[in-house]
């Protein structure tokens, strides 16, 4: 880790929304006068009934619950669109860059977006959708994906976006878990010149989802797909027959806005639930503070709408702030590794927000692709999703931004709704690899394994000591799991699952997950999910999955697989199992390594010692690195694993 300082550039210090003194005063007030502070901050939203209550949350078992602005009434889609119409109806709200650079971009002004969303909402109503219903969205990165989210918000339906790279099996599980009655999809998606059969995947998934009554299909590629009579309808046909206006549904601040499934250390993915008022405020406020958003800026968050980053920083935060948000259909390195920078030039992007994994992949291709473009419009660069290694940070800063653009490294989680620890460009001196300091109202602490709060420069487990408006409210359908997962390890505090170091300047450095969650190319993956997929295969008796350091992906997936008696391990089977996992979960879960293991290291009570498996996967196989193995039921298992280590 580097301790070099990159001080706030002079022009930023004088022109930013907040300089250091302003930030410090603002933070102090957010803690000391929290009630007044948050009611004031809440005024940035348009309320039908403004709240008089702010934080009424408790992390304690006796009165556990998270609640903000509970007497406020608003509509999220009206906040993201309608209220901008008078002032910036003709400004571009969504600027869409297609997969292929040879195709024309599409632009929707706020006025046009209003009509698109209203018609979409009326189509949803026409098939019976109403406030409180869950609607699953399985879409490519096209403007209609954003309109779908906003259309749900408009009628008070709860959306659950499932990443378009997930398999039919994974999609079905998520549809069933939240009892969706409606699915929104497209005929096909496009990525890097290839098509993704979204509608066909939905058809396959729906064989296991009897509760789904209708599928609204967006025509994206125009290729032929099967439409089930009475169940499926084309958006463009239905939209032409409904009204162009749809009054927004008044929603309580604590009414659910969306569910987003994310991986934990155990069991199946959890439906993280966010509500309307606090979430929107958090997304909008952090978008403004981190990116110093100014009207007229072209802002590009290169995430997918299937992840929380896409929700908060492509759709809700920027649109609530009246921004022009760029949506990109494709991938960073297609058709060439210069594509991202070409998009920056094509649209004169001021702010670019992307993931370290993309930067590492592009960095590997050499600087020439970057230098072939101008990038003079850029003034701010952001990163999210995993720790950024100082080398990638320096490349982003020096080569992409030519030393001109602050790097905004935002640490946060699906559960937190928006950025929690991150710099503000006019206020925060930067250190490569550090997410720096907390956002307003965020109280990070570092605790030891007993939960003792550690002071000063120290490393340990990162917890958050009090609630913030964007905090998740529950695990859909399992409030007890919410409490058990996040508030029992260190009672009275929110457990992040991340480790962190705090340095002498009070800066936070995220060291990565301390649980069985791994981060593959910025995608969060529960090792338990990959294990469950593997053991579903008839040849597999047992599987244990761990992460290992990977140059581009951050972490790779290393699977130890024990086969059923009589099954011969060979390369064909290895490839079959890799394919199997891709079909069960999706390509993002593709194991990088499968090592066949006659036995796994277990304690006498049968618990798999993952610590040992992690070390072997990392290539640390000395007796010293592996530590005490004498408590294992069969210590010789370890010798076999080391001897047959893959790669
Ligand atoms: C990791 C993504 C270091 C972390 C927004 C967290 C990060 C998990 C950073 C959440 C960062 C995210 N530096 N690590 N700037 N941002 N992480 O839910 O381990 O997909 O717990 O949310 O990503 O992943 P999720």
Image (tube, rainbow, N blue to C red):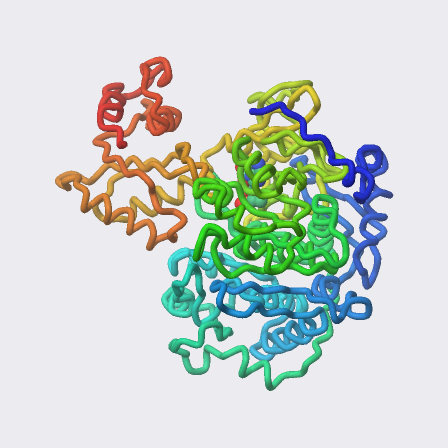
Residue at 77% over, 70% down: 85
Residue 290, quarter of the rendered image: top right
Q: Quadrant of residue 613?
A: top left
Residue 16 picture location, percent across and down: 79, 43
The total of numbered circles placed on residues is 0
Q: Name the residue located 47 percent from the left edge and 70 percent from the top edge.
A: 186
Query: Residue 121, relative to residue 571: is it above or below?
Result: below
Question: Which percent across, then down, holds residue 338?
Answer: 49, 51
Asked whether the viewer can see residue 436, the reply is: yes
Closest to the observer, 239 or 374 = 374
Q: Is the C terminus in the top left, top right, bottom left or bottom right quadrant?
A: top left
Dividing the image into 4 quarters, which one contains the N terminus?
A: top right
Point out residue 294 in the picture as x, y percentages from the top left corner: 76, 53
Note whether 388 is above or below 215 in the view shown.
Answer: above
- Vertical placement of 233 versus 169: above or below? below
Left or right: where 240 falls relative to 29: left
| Location of ligand 1 given as a quarter of the image | top right
Drawn side of residue 80 relative to residue 527, left or right: right
Q: Nearer the viewer, residue 102 or 125?
A: 102
- For residue 117, which quarter of the picture? bottom right
Counting from the top left corner in percent of width and height, residue 230 is at 45, 82
Is residue 490 among what the camera can see?
A: no
Residue at the farthest bottom position: 241
């Amino acid at each position: 880790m580097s301790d070099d300082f990159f001080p706030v550039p002079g022009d930023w210090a004088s022109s930013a929304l907040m300089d250091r003194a302003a930030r410090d005063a603002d933070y102090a007030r957010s803690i000391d006068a929290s009630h007044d502070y948050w009611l004031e901050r809440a005024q940035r939203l348009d309320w039908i009934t403004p709240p008089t209550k702010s934080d009424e949350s408790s992390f304690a078992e006796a009165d556990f619950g998270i609640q903000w602005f509970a007497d406020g009434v608003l509509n999220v889609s009206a906040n993201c669109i309608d209220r901008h119409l008078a002032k910036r109806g003709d400004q571009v709200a969504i600027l869409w860059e297609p997969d292929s650079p040879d195709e024309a971009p599409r632009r929707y002004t706020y006025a046009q977006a209003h009509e698109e969303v209203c018609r979409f909402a009326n189509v949803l109503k026409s098939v019976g959708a109403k406030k409180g219903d869950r609607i699953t969205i399985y879409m490519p990165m096209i403007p209609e994906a954003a309109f779908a989210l906003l259309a749900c918000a408009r009628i008070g339906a709860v959306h659950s976006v499932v990443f378009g790279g997930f398999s039919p099996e994974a999609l079905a599980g998520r549809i069933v878990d939240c009892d969706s009655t409606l699915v929104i999809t497209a005929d096909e998606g496009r990525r890097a010149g290839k098509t993704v059969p979204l509608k066909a995947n939905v058809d396959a998934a729906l064989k296991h989802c009897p509760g789904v009554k209708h599928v609204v299909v967006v025509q994206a590629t125009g290729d032929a797909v099967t439409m089930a009579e009475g169940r499926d309808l084309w958006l463009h046909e239905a939209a032409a027959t409904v009204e162009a206006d749809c009054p927004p549904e008044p929603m309580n601040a604590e009414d659910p806005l969306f569910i987003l499934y994310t991986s934990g250390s155990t069991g199946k993915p959890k439906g993280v639930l966010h509500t309307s008022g606090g979430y929107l405020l958090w997304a909008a406020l952090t978008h403004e503070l981190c990116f110093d958003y100014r009207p007229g800026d072209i802002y590009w968050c290169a995430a997918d709408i299937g992840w929380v980053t896409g929700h908060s920083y492509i759709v809700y935060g920027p649109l609530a702030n009246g921004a022009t948000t760029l949506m990109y259909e494709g991938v960073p390195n297609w058709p060439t590794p210069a594509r991202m920078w070409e998009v920056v030039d094509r649209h004169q992007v001021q702010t670019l927000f992307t993931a370290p994994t993309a930067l590492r992949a592009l960095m590997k291709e050499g600087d020439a692709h970057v230098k072939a473009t101008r990038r003079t419009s850029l003034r701010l660069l952001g990163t999210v999703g995993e720790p950024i290694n100082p080398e990638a940070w320096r490349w982003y800063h020096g080569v992409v931004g030519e030393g001109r653009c602050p790097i905004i490294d935002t640490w946060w989680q699906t559960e937190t709704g928006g950025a929690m620890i991150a710099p503000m460009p006019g206020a925060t001196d930067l250190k490569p690899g550090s997410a720096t300091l907390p956002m307003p109202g965020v109280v990070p602490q570092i605790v030891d394994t007993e939960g003792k709060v550690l002071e000063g420069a120290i490393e340990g487990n990162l917890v958050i000591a009090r609630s913030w408006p964007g905090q998740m409210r529950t695990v859909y359908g399992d409030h007890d799991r919410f409490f058990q997962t996040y508030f029992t390890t260190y009672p009275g505090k929110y457990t992040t699952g991340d480790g962190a170091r705090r340095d002498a300047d009070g800066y936070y450095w995220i060291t990565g997950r301390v649980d069985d969650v791994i981060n593959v190319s910025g995608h969060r993956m529960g090792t338990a999910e990959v294990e469950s997929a593997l053991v579903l295969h008839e040849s597999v008796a047992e599987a244990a999955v761990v992460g290992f350091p990977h140059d581009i992906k951050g972490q790779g997936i290393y699977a130890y697989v024990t086969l059923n008696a009589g099954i011969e391990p060979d390369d064909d089977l290895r490839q079959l199992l890799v394919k199997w996992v891709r079909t069960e979960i999706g390509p993002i879960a593709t194991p990088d390594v499968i090592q066949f293991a006659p036995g796994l290291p277990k304690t006498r009570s049968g618990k798999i010692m993952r610590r040992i498996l992690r070390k072997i996967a990392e290539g640390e196989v000395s007796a010293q690195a592996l530590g005490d193995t004498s408590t294992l039921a069969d210590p010789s298992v370890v010798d076999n694993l080391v001897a047959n280590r893959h790669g």
